[in-house]
Image: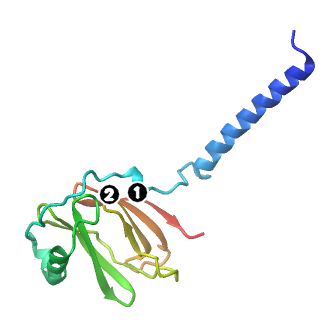
Amino acid sequence: MRSRSTLFYLTLLSVTVLWLGCARVSAQTSPAGGSSEVPQFKDYPAGELYKGATAPLVLAQKDQEFRGKLRAAAKSQKPNFAGHYILTTWGCGGGCVMGAAIDARTGKVYWWDFTVCCWPETDDNFKPIDFRADSRLIIFSGLRNEKEGDDGAHFYVFDNGQFKFLKTKTKN
C-alpha cells in the first residue's frame, strides 16, 4: 500500500500533466476553435528549384497591358518563388503594388486578382509581398484592392496555377 505522500505526489503529477496538455491545446487554437498559428513557408514546399533557361513568354490577351514589365522580369530574373516561378511586382500608383508569377519552364503568366497597398510604416526590410523560392506560400500585407477593414497579413498558397486563400491575420 502506498503512503499518503506518494499518493499526493502522484495526484499532483497527474494534475500537472493534464494542465500542461490543456494549456498546449489552448495555445494552438483560437477562442473560435480555428488555428491561431499562421501558415509557415516550410509547410508549403515547392520542390526542386528550376535552374534551366527561362522559356519564352506565352502572353494571353489579359497579359498584354503589362507585357513590357513581364518581359523585363523574364529576361532579368531567375526563379524566386514556388520552385520554378519568377514572381515580379511593380507599383500601380500611390504606394500600391501588383504583379504576377511567370512559369520559367513554360512561359505562362499567373496573376493574383488584387492590388496590395496601405501597409503599416515599418523598417527598411519590410516587404508588402513576402515569398520564398522553395515555398508555394505567399503573404500579402496591407489592404487588398484598398478595401477598408481588410488590413492584415493575407496568406495564400500557389497551387495548380492559382493563388488560393488560406487565412488572414488581422492587426490587433
Q: Position of residue 69 (x, y in %)?
A: 19, 82
Q: Place residue 131 in its image quadrant.
A: bottom left
Residue that badge 1 annotates: 41
Q: Position of residue 55 (x, y in %)?
A: 9, 66
Does 35 appear above or below 153? above
Verify CB contact (< 8 Å) between mark 1 and mark 2: yes
Helix, strand or loop at label 1? It is: helix
Question: Farthest residue toward the front?
Answer: 51
Label 1 amino acid?
Answer: Phe
Q: Place residue 99 in its image quadrant.
A: bottom left
Q: Is residue 36 left or right of residue 97?
A: right
Q: Position of residue 116 (x, y in %)?
A: 38, 77
Label 2 amino acid?
Answer: Asp
Residue that badge 2 annotates: 134
- Specify few, some or many for label 2: CA neighbours under 10 Å numbering under 14, 14-19, or 20 or more: many
Q: Nearer the viewer, residue 1 or 48?
A: 48
